Image: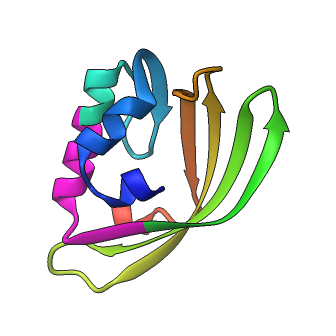
Amino acid sequence: MKDLNSLSTEHLEKWFTDESVIWIPPSREISGKNRILALFRAIFRRYEKIEWRVSEIFSLGNDKYFYQTNSYGNLPGNERYENEICTIIEFSKSGQIIYLSDYFKDTKIFN
């Protein structure tokens, strides 16, 4: 989470490989390290401020985890918002992200 909150793709680079797949709505599923980092650059540019705080982590077994997270931030010209996120993450044996999928409680910020 520290690397994500840095808003620096240089810090995120170590978490992904060319085989990594992520799905962060409203974008479509994306695979490959370079495309994933490009998505994060676009997300970071879109917000005036954004940060994430993990409230719970549940092990699902087989290197899969369920993260319960809150995001806080604002888009240019909009008031601050808070959103709850549920994330499923699968890690490789070396600790890199194989698969990540987010589920948002409230999606009106994206419309």
Task: Name the residue nearer the viewer: 21 or 59.
Answer: 59
The image quadrant of residue 48 is bottom left
Could you tell me which quadrant the C terminus lies in? Answer: bottom left
> Which stretch appears magenta?
38-51
Residue at figure coordinates x 40%, y 80% from the top left: 81
Quick check: is 45 in the magenta stretch? yes
Looking at the image, the residue that sits furthest to the top is 19
Up-down relation of residue 22 to residue 41 (above or below): above
Residue at figure coordinates x 23%, y 55% from the top left: 44
Up-down relation of residue 7 to residue 55 (above or below): above
Task: Name the residue nearer the viewer: 92 or 77.
Answer: 92
Up-down relation of residue 70 to residue 100 (above or below): below
Residue at figure coordinates x 32%, y 68% from the top left: 50
Q: Position of residue 3 (x, y in %)?
A: 38, 51
Q: Is residue 29 visible?
A: no
Task: Name the residue nearer the viewer: 50 or 25.
Answer: 50
Residue 54 shown left or right of residue 111 in the figure: right
Task: Name the residue nearer the viewer: 25 or 94.
Answer: 94
Q: Position of residue 7 (x, y in %)?
A: 27, 56
Q: Position of residue 89 (x, y in %)?
A: 62, 37
Task: State the predominant SS element of the stretch in magenta.
Answer: helix
Residue at figure coordinates x 33%, y 84% from the top left: 80
The image quadrant of residue 28 is top left
